[in-house]
Image (cartoon, helix red, strand yellow):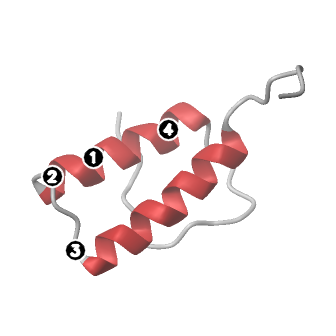
Amino acid sequence: MLHSMSTTVEPDSERSAAEVNEEIRALWRRSGGTLSVEQREQYQQLVLEWATAAPQSSRAA
């Protein structure tokens, strides 16, 4: 099931990395592979949300 497509990212979101990833994929599908300025902004916000939600490695780089 797809999460509803929001235009803003909630900083304290409880969504999993998988849910955010699915929204990123849906954004790319809707765009046809070329993001508008607004879509790029949304993409950047989603990537930040995904990075926050993604499990962190226990090893230092």
Placement of the N terminus among the 4 image quadrants:
top left
Give the residue at x 22% y 65%: 35
Q: Is residue 34 above or below residue 61?
A: below
Q: Nearer the viewer, residue 44 or 12?
A: 44
Check disc 4 and give the amino acid type. Answer: Glu
- Which sits earlier in the primary sequence, circle 1 or circle 2? 1
Q: Residue 26 in the image: x percent, y percent? A: 27, 46
Residue drawn at x 24%, y 50% as measured from the top left = 28
Tell me the residue at 16%/60% (across/down).
34
Residue topped by disc 1: 26
Residue 27, compared with residue 8, is above or below; it is: above
The image quarter containing residue 61 is top right
CA separation in Å, label 1 and label 2: 11 Å
User: x, y percentage for residue 15?
Assistant: 61, 44
* Disc with the residue nearer the chain's start (4 vs 3): 4
Instruction: Say left or right for 15 vs 43.
Output: right
Q: Which quarter of the picture shows residue 31? A: bottom left
Mark found first going from the N terminus, 4 or 2: 4
Query: Amino acid type of disc 3?
Result: Ser
Q: Which mark lies nearer to you, 4 or 2?
A: 2
Q: Is residue 25 visible?
A: yes
Measured in 3D between alpha carbons, the distance from the residue under mark 3 to the one under mark 1, in whole angstroms, is 14 Å
- Distance of mark 1 from mark 4, alpha carbons? 11 Å
Can you identify the residue that label 4 sits on? 19
Residue at the disc numbered 3: 36
The secondary structure type at the circle numbered 1 is helix
